[in-house]
Image (cartoon, helix red, strand yellow):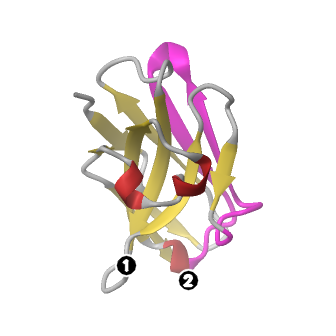
Amino acid sequence: QVQLEESGGGLVQAGGSLRLSCTASRRTSNRFNMGWFRQAPGKEREFVACIVWNSGQTYYADSGKGRFTISRDNAKNTVYLQMNSLKPEDTAVYHCVAGSEIITSAVRNSVSYSYWGQGTQVTVSS
């Protein structure tokens, strides 16, 4: 079992930045891909970014490319999502996820991740 706890959400003006953090209850660097999904009111849950456990390869949704950066600190069992140039459409609850044995073609699929955090609210005002 892996428990995930997010932090760092909040209210920010458009164009601002936030850094989300997600700390796992145990070591994840040896087998778990880590990532972020988000869900806005009335919308489908969508993939944001992920980082592969062994290679460090990162994947991003088109909506966040060039603005979002995912990274991980294995010593702290923590993954980060740095979000810059935020837009009102980035407003959502952001969930940290962890999953193992995920093939490359499935990294953007929510069912690939077994563990989910409760989420942290990000609100971007215009």
Looking at numbered disc 1 in the image, what kind of residue is underneath it?
Glu
Q: Nearer the viewer, residue 105 or 20?
A: 105
The residue stretch that appears in magenta: 62-88
Q: Position of residue 34 (x, y in %)?
A: 48, 39
Q: Point out the residue furthest to the right here.
A: 66
At 51% across and 13% down in the image, what residue appears?
Answer: 75
Looking at numbered disc 2 in the image, what kind of residue is underneath it?
Ser
The residue carrying mark 1 is 44
Of badges 2 and 1, the one in the foreground is: 1
Q: Is residue 73 magenta?
A: yes
At 46% across and 39% down in the image, what residue appears?
Answer: 21
The residue carrying mark 2 is 126
**In the rendered image, the vertical position of residue 113 relative to residue 125, given as above or below:** above
Q: Is residue 94 magenta?
A: no
The residues tagged by marks 2 and 1 sit, at their Cα atoms, a distance apart of 22 Å
Q: Position of residue 123 (x, y in %)?
A: 43, 69
Q: Secondary structure at mark 1?
A: loop
Q: Position of residue 124 (x, y in %)?
A: 50, 72
Q: Secondary structure at mark 2?
A: loop
Q: Position of residue 104 (x, y in %)?
A: 61, 48
Q: Earlier in the sequence, mark 2 or mark 1?
A: 1
At 67% across and 32% down in the image, what residue appears?
Answer: 56
Answer with the quarter of the image where residue 46 lies.
bottom left
**In the rendered image, the vertical position of residue 8 relative to residue 100, given as above or below:** below
**Quarter of the rendering occupied by the C terminus:** bottom right
Answer with left or right where residue 51 lies relative to residue 122: right
**In the rendered image, the vertical position of residue 43 relative to residue 30, given as above or below:** below
Q: Nearer the viewer, residue 91 or 64?
A: 64
Q: How many marks?
A: 2
